Amino acid sequence: MNDSLHQLRCFGCGARIASAEARPDFRCALCGDLFEVEYPGWGQAKGHDRPNPGALKWLWRERRCSSETLDHSGVWRFRELLPILESFGNAVTLREGNTPLYPLTRAAKSLGIDQLFAKHQGMNPTGSFKDTGMTAALSVARERGFGWVACASTGNTSASMAAYAARAGLRSLVLIPEGKIAWGKLSQAMDYGALTLQLKTDFDGCLGILTEIVQQAPVYLLNSVNPYRLEGQKTPAFEIAEAFDWNVPDHLIVPGGNLGNSSALGKGFREMKELGLVARMPRISVIQAAGANPLVQSLATHHGARLEPVVAHTRATAIRIGNPASWRKAARAIQDTGGWCLDVTEAEIAVAKAELGAEGLGCEPASAVTLAGLKKLRRQGAVNAGESVVLVLTGHTLKDADYTIDFHRGTLLQTEEKTGLESQIEALRRNAQVLEAKPEAVLAALKDSAG
Ligand code: F0G
């Protein structure tokens, strides 16, 4: 590892250690908190390790036309800001990143906002934002000579890890809560050859067990407690800034589960500001499902100083997490930037997801909390018409086709959950009718629908 360029700093007590000293569970030996990757050379006013903003912007743009494999990655294209490998030749890449930033014209119009965009991280190789972090942390695992990697997951981390491990020729161990992840994700872990174990517990239980396993077996932990995951996951912040010609949007809205992603994006924007690549940070808001909202409660009740775990329930299974590991880091991203943390109901999530689908994008339910959250913020007067807002869509719509089909069939939500949203739900539903195989039947349906 390139210890001369990076070290690990404990987020809780500030202790600094060399990367090789990290414990297998990535918890601080002194206080038990998580680490962040830190690059001491960047702090020096004119140190030769401190990146030059103008040169970097030029170089990163040039790489978009390069024929080098590493330059095709939207993570490693920014490798000057993640010097975590001894040799970039060890990077395991599937051409992750470089995801689209779509204008959301219809949602913008109905919300009365001038500039609304979706950064669609579901357009990554395994269909979720996890790929940007996985390419970074799994490359570290390979460079360090691990034969096995492992994660606990609500589905997307496991799909991503299994794919990258397979590419690198490593074995992977997946622990998932039995019956509580979407089939698309489970099928990916199996397809990519992971040892997939469904445990009779929830995500938090799986992560607890894995934390014990990695201390007893030579298995490299790839959950987002691993600080190298966040190094990869900070790169969409660079892409967003680049897309805005290095003027950041006013507001970034991110779903919150284990809270690694919001932490990573916060780190990405903070580093860009510290290095002079951008002049300010966007407001970062985190949205949780109402049944899985420990950070919302922590900020409302304890100003983010303490978090009480909850027993999580939501159909957005990706964020069904009651005891998020990176809550302190996410709280800092929100508080540093003046963002909000709020929760949305099951019906609000379902409506927002259908609206994103109707704009031709689609996403998984956990991603749709962003639009549902923006609607709530707009209703509360927290977002102005003139603000530019980016929603981070974290997963592809095909990850959880059952949810989508249940919504359109009208079997997803209980009657009492729909209160107040009945007409919106009915207007969005598109049932797949069964007809006689006759042109007149199809023409009648067409006429019905046009009328
Ligand atoms: N959206 C999707 C689609 C996710 O899969 C996750 C997390 C999140 C949002 C929340 O991100 O945890 O960084 O706050 N999925 C994890 C997994 C936990 O195991 O796939 P977070």
Image: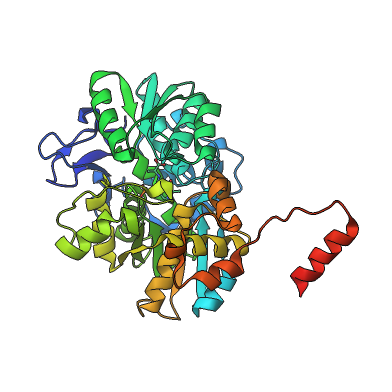
- Seen in the picture, residue 284 relative to 67 is either above or below; the reply is below
**Does residue 248 appear in the picture of this structure?**
no
> In this rendering, is residue 220 above or below 347?
above
Q: Position of residue 105 (x, y in %)?
A: 58, 72
Q: Which colour scheme is used?
A: rainbow
The foreground one among 72 and 389 is 389
**Quadrant where the C terminus is found in the figure:** bottom right
Task: Determine the residue positioned at 53% across, 33% down.
Answer: 188
Q: Is residue 362 visible?
A: yes
Q: Which of 280 and 120 is in front in this view?
A: 120
At horizontal 65% and vertical 61% (from top left) the residue drawn is 430
In the shown orientation, is residue 201 left or right of residue 428? Answer: left
Q: How many marks?
A: 0
Q: Which residue appears farthest toward the left when viewing the image?
A: 30
Q: In this view, does 213 lie above or below 156?
A: above
- Residue 102, how many percent across, how many down? 57, 62
x, y percentage for residue 262? 34, 54
Q: Is residue 79 left or right of residue 341?
A: right
Q: Position of residue 129 (x, y in %)?
A: 46, 47
Residue 362, by quadrant, is: bottom right
In the picture, which quadrant includes the N terminus?
A: top left
For residue 363, what is the image quadrant? bottom right
Residue positioned most to the front: 415
Q: Quadrant of residue 199?
A: top left
